[in-house]
Image (cartoon, rainbow, N blue to C red):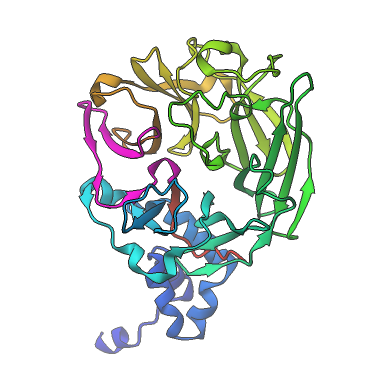
């Protein structure tokens, strides 16, 4: 018995199964053991197996955020050389357990950010960042902060400094297993039809290609800049495309509108003009998805799209009284819309421009950002209890991206 036990050897498939459930930092430590583990960790099949299980682990869900530090308490949105920024990845599980603490992760120089980058999107553990080191040098790159690897910077096809209205989105083409960046620009001039330019960058061939123009206008392209009391001059806050199941989705406006003057959400648009514009990254073609039939009031703040529990969700303010979240249970199926939440503004003691960031698996806890005042809340749906997150750092909550640790290489 003892002799048999001492000589027991686990089959390779059992070892692979066990290792695939480990967090990334422990998997990476196994590289030094022997050639078998060093080869296994970078095997594409194992990387995909590990990713599939990471998304199912309770404690694996995180937020990727930009954290600002400055000595003179300068607003990071203002031009100043007195601040630095860093990337932090914050465990949602830890945040829900303790929402009053100071983050020290940014002290690692590896995570310090230069050239004022912002996170375009997050997918499979990869972050897509945009940066501008000078007026004539703008770039994008992919980064997996968990395994500390970055892609080479790829330059843009235009002068972003003189054309700041380009919008970027990041996603994954399931058919070719390729990561893609979508960039579009809409030019709206008086007495002229809107002109759009849409380009796709494929990480597979490292090149920009023109694709079909936008059939309808994304909402942010036609909004009056004075709609919000605090104008946000950061392009990445304006109706970012939402990635889900190989598609990029935007809230858009269909039918004829008066493009000779900028419009406001609450006074110039009708409900039936809103639509979801969905771009399939595989076919690079568009589909228009209808909003819930019961969505019958035009909101004060621009409505938003988010992904909660792997479903596309449409969020809007309702008569300055409630914040409503609709969920499309089956993507692309109009009849599958359900009203997920109708949250009273009274629960927050203030009228807010809310952006959902995360919904717990049991569906009873929401993490939300207040876009207007750069703060975040935890909302318990069972008892309507609201707790403000008190973190002693200057974090850009509305720009948070859902993130999961992975072994996926950005190269």
* Magenta segment boundaries in residue numbering: 371-400
Q: Is residue 216 above or below residue 121?
A: above
x, y (%) of residue 9?
39, 81
- Residue at 28% across, 33% down: 364
Q: Is residue 357 above or below residue 291?
A: below
The answer to whether residue 204 shows anywhere in this view is: yes
Would residue 357 appear left or right of 160 to someone viewing this image? left
Q: Is residue 142 above or below residue 33?
A: above
The verdict on residue 312 being magenta is no
Query: Which quarter of the image is occupied by the C terminus?
Result: bottom right
Question: Where on the picture, by quarter, is residue 183?
Answer: top right
Query: In this view of the protein, which residue sits in the foreground, 183 or 49?
Result: 183
Would residue 118 appear left or right of 93 to someone viewing this image? right
The verdict on residue 375 being magenta is yes
x, y (%) of residue 351?
32, 22
x, y (%) of residue 190?
74, 21
- Which residue appears farthest toward the bottom when viewing the image? 3
- Residue at 47% across, 10% down: 297
- Residue at 54% across, 35% down: 238
The answer to whether residue 123 shows anywhere in this view is: no
Would residue 358 appear left or right of 346 to someone viewing this image? right
Count the labels in the image: 0
x, y (%) of residue 309?
43, 38
Query: In this view of the protein, which residue sits in the foreground, 301 or 22?
Result: 301
Query: Which quarter of the image is occupied by the N terminus?
Result: bottom left
């Amino acid at each position: 018995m003892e002799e048999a036990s001492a000589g027991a050897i686990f089959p390779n498939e059992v070892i692979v199964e066990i290792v695939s459930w480990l967090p990334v930092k422990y998997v990476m430590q196994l590289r030094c053991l022997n050639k078998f583990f060093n080869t296994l960790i970078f095997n594409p099949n194992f990387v995909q197996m590990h990713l599939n299980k990471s998304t199912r682990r309770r404690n694996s869900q995180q937020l990727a955020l930009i954290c600002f530090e400055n000595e003179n308490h300068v607003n990071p949105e203002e031009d100043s050389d007195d601040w630095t920024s860093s990337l932090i990845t914050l465990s949602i599980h830890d945040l829900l357990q303790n929402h009053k603490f100071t983050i020290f992760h940014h002290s690692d120089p590896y995570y310090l950010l230069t050239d004022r980058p912002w996170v375009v999107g997050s997918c499979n553990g990869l972050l897509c960042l945009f940066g501008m080191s000078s007026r004539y040098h703008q770039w994008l790159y992919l980064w997996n902060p968990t395994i500390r690897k970055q892609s080479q910077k790829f330059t843009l096809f235009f002068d972003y400094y003189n054309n700041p209205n380009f919008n970027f989105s990041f996603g994954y083409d399931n058919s070719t297993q390729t990561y893609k960046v979508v960039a579009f620009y809409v030019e709206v001039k008086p007495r002229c039809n809107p002109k759009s330019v849409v380009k796709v960058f494929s990480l597979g061939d490292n090149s920009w290609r023109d694709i079909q123009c936008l059939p309808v206008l994304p909402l942010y392209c036609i909004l009056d800049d004075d709609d919000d009391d605090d104008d946000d001059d950061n392009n990445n806050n304006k109706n970012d495309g939402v990635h889900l199941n190989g598609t990029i989705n935007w809230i858009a406006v269909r039918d004829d509108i008066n493009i000779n003057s900028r419009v406001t959400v609450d006074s110039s648009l009708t409900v039936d003009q809103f639509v979801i514009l969905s771009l399939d990254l595989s076919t690079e073609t568009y589909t228009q998805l209808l909003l819930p039939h019961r969505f019958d009031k035009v909101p004060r703040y621009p409505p938003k799209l988010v992904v909660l529990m792997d479903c596309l969700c449409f969020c809007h303010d309702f008569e300055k009284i409630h914040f409503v979240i609709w969920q499309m249970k089956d993507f692309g199926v109009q009849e599958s819309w359900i009203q997920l939440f109708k949250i009273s503004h009274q629960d927050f003691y203030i009228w807010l421009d809310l952006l959902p960031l995360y919904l717990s698996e049991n569906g009873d806890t929401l993490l939300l950002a207040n876009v207007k005042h750069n703060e975040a809340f935890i909302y318990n749906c069972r008892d309507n209890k609201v707790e403000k997150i008190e973190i002693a750092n200057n974090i850009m909550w509305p720009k948070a991206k859902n993130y999961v640790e992975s072994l996926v290489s950005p190269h």
